[in-house]
Image (cartoon, rainbow, N blue to C red):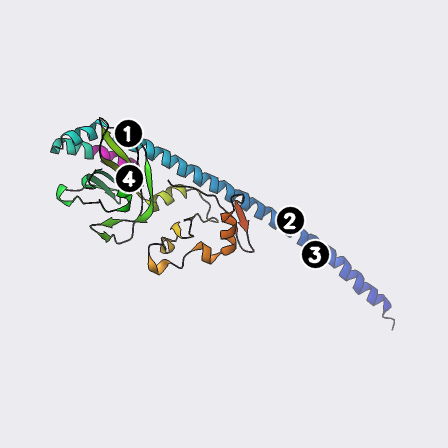
Amino acid sequence: MNLKPIKYFVVTFLLIGATPIFYFWTLYQTELNAIQSLRETEAKHQLNYSQNAINEISSELSTSLRLLSDSRALLQFIQSPSLKNRALLESLWALTATNYSYISQVRFIDTDGMEQSRVDDINGEIKVTPIYQLQDKSQRNYFLYAQTLKAEEVGTFGIDLEVENGKVVIPLQPTLRIFTPVEVADERKGYLVFNLDVYEIIEEIDYSIDSHYNLEFVDLEGYYLASKNKEKMLGNLIEERDSFNLLIENPNLWRAMEDRNIHNFKDKKHFYAFNKYSIR
């Protein structure tokens, strides 16, 4: 029996069979690379969208803060803190807090650090703090920083935990504060303060992001300031969360982020787009 033709047939069959397999594998890789490139481009667009959203929120809040600090209602309250003037002022603040879901508190703190008036937005319900429940904030770091501001300057104090009567609020409420001095006839009378709910801000700027992307903010030490995963936020303030640190989790990514000329990074599993942003 002559096996030579059979041998040639097998070799020919394998070669012919390998050609379409190679073609489809190449096509698959091309499509895969195209999808990956598209995802990377989309990630960069989403990052730009989020940064623009932050800038817009910041601009709106700064404008609102300045307008309220110079409002007739606040001036009248400072000059004559009657019940009528207090009610008018708090009504104006309640409207502001209602219009901006991420404003959790509006307060006027005098130059000694005492709250003189305060309105809270708690889960969409506006509450006015009674006079006897107003607190002394003179030793809080954000108040000490506010005292360094010049007239009409807007200051921002980094994200920390909400504290009431000397105790951290439970459940935890990460808060960002912005404030500006209030002056009458060039004499400083105190500070108008907005407390901002970090969770609400994240929800606002994360609204249109595709489910494939995960938006997070980290500080200069690698701790998470904001994330969809609330359990890993503020490891710099909460001891049991101090292991949640990008510097520890992904040192290669962190090194790339520290380079001002690099704005994205890719490893075997993920693509990262990032940018540096100052909240002050």
Does residue 226 appear in this view? no
Which label lies toward us, 3 or 4? Answer: 4
**Image quadrant of residue 193?**
top left
Q: Main secondary structure of the magenta part?
A: helix
Label 3 belongs to which residue?
21
The circle drawn on residue 152 is none
Q: Say what amino acid the circle numbered 1 marks.
A: Leu
Q: Residue furthest bottom?
A: 1
Q: Depth check: 14 or 96 in front?
A: 96
Query: How crowded is the residue under tag 3: few (<14 C-alpha within 10 Å), some, or many (20+)?
Result: few
Q: Which one is earlier in the sequence, the residue at label 1 or at label 2? A: 2
Label 2 belongs to which residue?
30
Image quarter hosting the C terminus? top left
Query: How crowded is the residue under tag 1: few (<14 C-alpha within 10 Å), some, or many (20+)?
Result: few
The magenta segment: 91-102
Q: Using residue 8 as the reference point, say whether residue 173 is left or right of it.
A: left
Please, what secondary structure does the residue beneath circle 3 have?
A: helix
Q: CA distance from mark 2 to mark 4?
A: 56 Å
x%, y% of residue 9?
81, 63
Label 1 belongs to which residue?
67
